Amino acid sequence: MSLVKALVIVMLILLCFIIALGGGPNHVRTGFRFWRDPGAFAQYSASAGDDKVVIQGATGRFLSVWACMVQATFAYLGTELVGVAFGETPNPRKNVPRAVTQTLMRIVFFYIGGIIVLGMAVKYTDPLLGAVKKTSGLASPFVIAAKNAGINKLDDAVNGLLLIFTVSAANSDIYLASRTVWALAKDRQAPAIMMKTNKRGVPIPAVILSSLFILLGYMNATKGSAQVFGYFVSLVTVFGALNWVAILVSYLFMIKAMKVQGVPREAMPYRNILLPWGAPIALFLTILIIIFNGYGAFFPHFQVDKFLTSYIGIPVFLINILWWKLLKKTKRVRPEDADLVTGRRSF
């Protein structure tokens, strides 16, 4: 499924690139025209029911860019899956650096490359972008680019392919969630039953618990699909960003412990050229996104549901930390006392 996903995305990127160069049935060469007319930055628009508002000027453009930042955070979440898989990876000294490099290259090509060609092939003011249901394949900007170029029926193919994408993503997410629950149980931070595995080492109770959240999809029965998806985007963004805050804080403390104990960075089998100085920058930006994730709840008027889904993760995160601190009476590990040896894999 991952291979199919990669091939489809490559095909769509090539399709938009060819259309932008005038290779479509209408032979219209757009190039970078849409980057100049109407420009690269849209005004921010928000809606709640029948109420709609468009914020003009520099403020509107800034809010639009920030909305893209929040959406991008949602899209990029899940790259930590590669870290969860390390525990079950043979020959990690060789495979871990390769996996991290491949993940970075895929992000650069698929995400950034896809955005560039879409900006060439589709104008952000295109009426089709807001004229169809968000749950239809017609809502895809790739489909709109093809339709404008005179290519029809691509929406049916995209609808079918979206099912493959969804199953592939669900597979990865259940793996990530179940292994996390299993690790928590192993550290006595979750019920012991979650540690049980079958003969193949699969933590069945943790997989069942993680799979139960699929039932949230039935919220579509009482709410619109676009509205429910918006709830999930907000929830996943704030919880995922908080997860990355924990990862970055842990990394910064590890680096401090290595410095205090005289362990050089060269001792690590994989070193990124953006680290360690990139970590505090990423931490600052991630905290900013958490704080302003729910600003859309205040436009065009205050919306309680959007506000709760955008910020409920913060008290849940802090209450879990405080509850565990008070219950177990744990103390902060000093850099000179941090254990940098136990659990290391030298093969």
Image (spheres, rainbow, N blue to C red):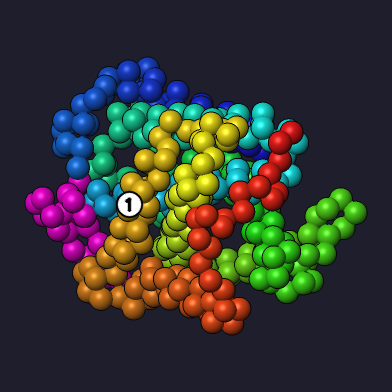
Work out which quarter of the rendered image holds the C terminus and state it.
top right
Work out which quarter of the rendered image holds the N terminus and state it.
top right
Q: Residue at x 69, y 60 (%)?
A: 183
Q: Residue at x 45, y 55 (%)?
A: 249
- In the displayed structure, 180 sits above or below 156; it is below
Quarter of image, res 179? bottom right
**SS of the residue under disc 1:** helix
Quarter of image, res 60? bottom left
Q: Nearer the viewer, residue 342 or 26?
A: 342
Residue 125 in the image, given as x and y percentages of width and height? 23, 43
Per the image, the residue denoted by label 1 is: 285
Residue 35 in the image, given as x and y percentages of width and height? 21, 31
Number of marks in the rendered image:
1
Q: Residue at x 32, y 23 (%)?
A: 20
Quarter of image, res 216? bottom right
Q: Which residue is drawn at 32% across and 18% down?
A: 21
Q: Which of 283 and 201 is in front in this view?
A: 283
| Residue 193 visible, this angle | yes
